Amino acid sequence: MTTTEGASVQLDHLVPPKEMEAVRQTSADTCTDSISLSSSPSCKEKEPFFTVRTMKGDVRETGTPDTLDDAWVSGRRGDMIRLTGKHPFNAEPPMTALMENFHTPQELLYVRNHGDAPQLDAATHKCKVGSLVSRPLELSLEDVKRFPPSSVTMTQICVGNRRKEQNQIKQGLGFNWGPTGVGTITYTGALMADILDAAGVLPEDGVGEERWLEGVGADETLRNGAYGTGLPLWRCMDRSLQVLLAYEINGEPLSVDHGFPFRIVAPGIIGGRFVKWVKTLDVVEGHPKNHWHWHDNKVLPPGVEVSNVGKEGWWQRPEYIIMDMNVNGAILSPHATEIVKPQKSGDGVGTVTMKGYAYSGGGHRILRAEVSTDGGLNWKLARHTDQLKSPTGRCWTWTFWEADVEVQTDRETVVCFRAQDDAMNIMPDVPTWNLLGMMNNAWYRIMLRPSGSPGELEAVHTLWATENDPIHPANVHARVPAGKGTGEAKEPPSHQLQVKNENRMETRGMRMSSACEASSFSASLQQWIPSAAQREVLRKVAVLSGVAVCTVGVLEGVEVLRGGRGVFFGRT
Amino acid sequence: MTTTEGASVQLDHLVPPKEMEAVRQTSADTCTDSISLSSSPSCKEKEPFFTVRTMKGDVRETGTPDTLDDAWVSGRRGDMIRLTGKHPFNAEPPMTALMENFHTPQELLYVRNHGDAPQLDAATHKCKVGSLVSRPLELSLEDVKRFPPSSVTMTQICVGNRRKEQNQIKQGLGFNWGPTGVGTITYTGALMADILDAAGVLPEDGVGEERWLEGVGADETLRNGAYGTGLPLWRCMDRSLQVLLAYEINGEPLSVDHGFPFRIVAPGIIGGRFVKWVKTLDVVEGHPKNHWHWHDNKVLPPGVEVSNVGKEGWWQRPEYIIMDMNVNGAILSPHATEIVKPQKSGDGVGTVTMKGYAYSGGGHRILRAEVSTDGGLNWKLARHTDQLKSPTGRCWTWTFWEADVEVQTDRETVVCFRAQDDAMNIMPDVPTWNLLGMMNNAWYRIMLRPSGSPGELEAVHTLWATENDPIHPANVHARVPAGKGTGEAKEPPSHQLQVKNENRMETRGMRMSSACEASSFSASLQQWIPSAAQREVLRKVAVLSGVAVCTVGVLEGVEVLRGGRGVFFGRT
């Protein structure tokens, strides 16, 4: 795990802030505050720095300037919807823009930055390829370009795409992505298998754990070290799966927000594994140790909540690490709040042409895109675009669909959308809530209702629905987990098979010592947290950031938490 | 398409018998008749022969002898549940037997025979490998064994596993599989890639259609030609996917019912592609032409029914051809009708240990096995066995799960089971009905209710539930399609991509001439259908068999239909 400046101590065991749940339940306003702490460049090294996820991500903040940290970044479109306030840059395109092109322009592709975008010089930045290889490499952009170039057109998703609908059921630990955390682009780069062949992956001895390729970026200002995660090595070595170290999108160099000079790309797999600004590539035995590999990109069982995720050790369980994208889709036209005029097709009935996208993961093709206006009793097949196939028959791209839908003109109509892929994966009726709000793929619902003007209907999307609307997730089905936990039984069943390396989770960095080293902080704490006001802001940060905050000890009755570039304290 | 003896004419367009729906609606008894027409071996060549699917497959016919056609087959277990009457042999094991072993004994593995099991001599039977290859081969069993042997432990499913639950909603075109059309075995054989390399697949010219490997068996007595179907060629050439021409199960030679001397095996893919008794392997351009490739192993949209499947051309559409197994599972203990004594755990509450299996396709691992006793509001995580991983990280096997479930002792409790795989595919709450009743993977429900004896509960499974029981599919949700059709819009959307070879369905044998050639039958018809009684039986057969019956013309006001070894007529 990368250590951060200003915090030389070991991480202690991971505990989410205890008051988090209480804060959520008692103060919705607190949760929707957008808090961004940044420091001037001159004192960057000295002061604590922290960025937060907000709960109010669906409000577009027009005209908000970038923080100083990202102020050097150019080319960000003003109409991208910022989901976490000013900083970091987490953004999705407007519904109205996403479907203008089947291939998404780079600047319209959603961005997920965990912190500052690192300012890298292509002439000097190198990626080290190492660990279980016989010929460690240091690759500049020019070096990577010397490998035979490979291009793949693919749909890339944020695992949080459509997360807001999960947060509408119950607030989880992530910020509110709408339905446009997705795009389809053509990446060009070197095949990872070529790079690994050049580095010479050491032969396996047959007794070690399954191997992974760990990639870590240059965004080293994050509170838990640079963002990094892994892919199973076999996926990287299988040329038919087209895993790349990519340096171009749509024929252009990667923009800063998409990982200049290069990023990992793995078609059919969640975007969370597409490490940007790659600084190291390591062939490792067993899962990578990087913090983010364990604390992000997981779908935990619905009974796992803030209250038990840490104490029951759920972060340390590798089986919930997700890889393939799932089947998903949305209605984007009519967009949220759009006023439409249905074509009259009968008494009190009209027709509205609806459009949207659908995709799946793992190379699967969309088999059916369907809409229903009777709650799923009957489905109308939408027409949809063919999907490009890779040379080995995989479909890595989305499909655009279109359907003429008959709706009521004098009262509300709920329209449900679902897709099914060729492996029979189907978008489920109801979401299954999960703590990180990931991979939400329940039927996409919109409502059309009389706007007040004759002949016009107003479109309401689920994620902008209020609790009074029938399509609000809490009203679709009463399937909000009642907080009973998972009821998990841990003993193996009688037919337990002992399989090599399964369920080994006691990895370095994950099973941390519980010994407190609070005393080592006492001197620097006064410097880091100069005022009571700043301490209060930091407390809010701790509460809001949730997942990634670590307790490092208790000092004079104050729980000491650790942030990105320093230490701050939580509740007294 | 293979032509059958006694029918030298071209097939006409495919039309399901028009009266089929009416018969179903008016005469449930007719549908449950088990009709098996067979002839004595001596006149086998001369008389029409036909085998049918029955609608009453869940009734075990104890002690029914094999027909003469299969009388030579030995080793069939008496406790296998026969689903289509005496013949052909379609059988699944009892619930109580399937989970005795993680590895299913060969004789307990479900069997799906479309007709007679062919009696092949390993010394003389050969498989021809041909078409787009440079070195056509003829392989005996000994030849196949000369390739380096490869073994793979895998779960194999019948695509109809759990079909009865779909038929409970509305009778489709398939017979009633329960939840044991599945097993886990170790196959050993030659890698298909090795065989194809030996045959020398011709280089692609880049302009042809996607290539497939078509396998056809030796069961040539079927009404539509020997059973055959295809796999995309790339899957067969990718050694990591372990497609085999297998000659052993669990270290034993294949039994007759599993394809002696060899069959195609493709881990993670539906059993319907595992052609038995392989006689030819052909590398072809575009989809194979075999009847069964188009008329079986499809999941059609829910609005496609008997009334529109033929006239709207659904059989000719390749996009509904299914490949990967989907995520599925069941509760097998307590088994259907079992009386259990819950461990008392409170007032009016007791605990019952439940067991079952779960699997997924495409190499995906089961992530969660869960039970709910409150209709899906809360889920209890079952403990489950680890899953074996292939050398390239794929999970080809099922998992056995176990959970202690709290139930009511004084009134009924409905227990729902669902599983999710690591690609986020989750068993849906409610089935989506499809005409062939395939891939049904809705939550598996059982009900425990007081048996009448103190302290005892009776288990009822969905597939044995009556319409008065809450777990009957028709009562779970009113999601029975209302027969409105698919409402499909056929024009392409504005973003239509022209992708090479997609949606080309005008393949030989599939786009048949609509010209009737009834006159050519007139001479032989009298010979083939000697009596009015036999004609009546044949009519029923035509009605029951549905899918595979073809109209070949109209003769003297009688619609002429074509069966396996001859021609018979349908309604006047």
Image (tube, coloured by chain):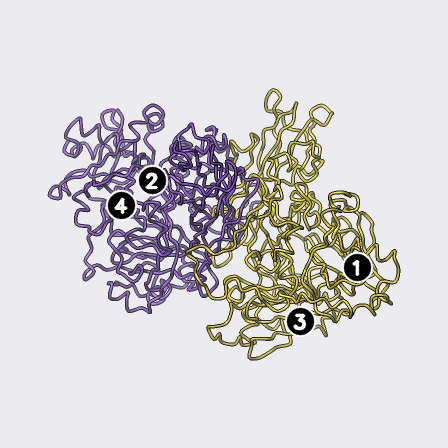
Chain colours: A purple, B yellow
Looking at the image, do the residues carrying marks 1 and 2 touch, with CB atoms under 8 Å apart? Answer: no
Mark 2 is on which residue type?
Met
Q: Earlier in the sequence, mark 3 or mark 1?
A: 3
- Residue marked by disc 4: A79
- Alpha carbons under labels 3 and 4: distance apart: 66 Å
- Disc number placed over residue B558 in the picture, else none: 1
* Amino acid at pointer 1: Val
Instruction: Say which residue appears at 71% left-offset and 61% top-offset.
Output: B550
Regarding mark 1 in the picture, which secondary structure is present there? Answer: strand
Q: Chain of mark 4?
A: A
- The local secondary structure at tag 2 comes to loop
Q: Nearer the viewer, residue B325 or B194?
A: B325
Q: Which residue is mark 3?
A: B141
Percent coordinates x, y for residue A450 in the rendering: 42, 33
- Give the amino acid at mark 4: Asp
Residue A543 in percent (x, y) is at: 29, 31
Query: Tag 2, which chain?
Result: A
Q: Earlier in the sequence, mark 4 or mark 2?
A: 4
Residue depth check, mark 3 versus mark 1: number of the one nearer the observer: 1
Amino acid of disc 3 = Leu
Q: Residues within 10 Å of mark 1 (few under 14, many from 20)?
A: few
Number of numbered discs: 4
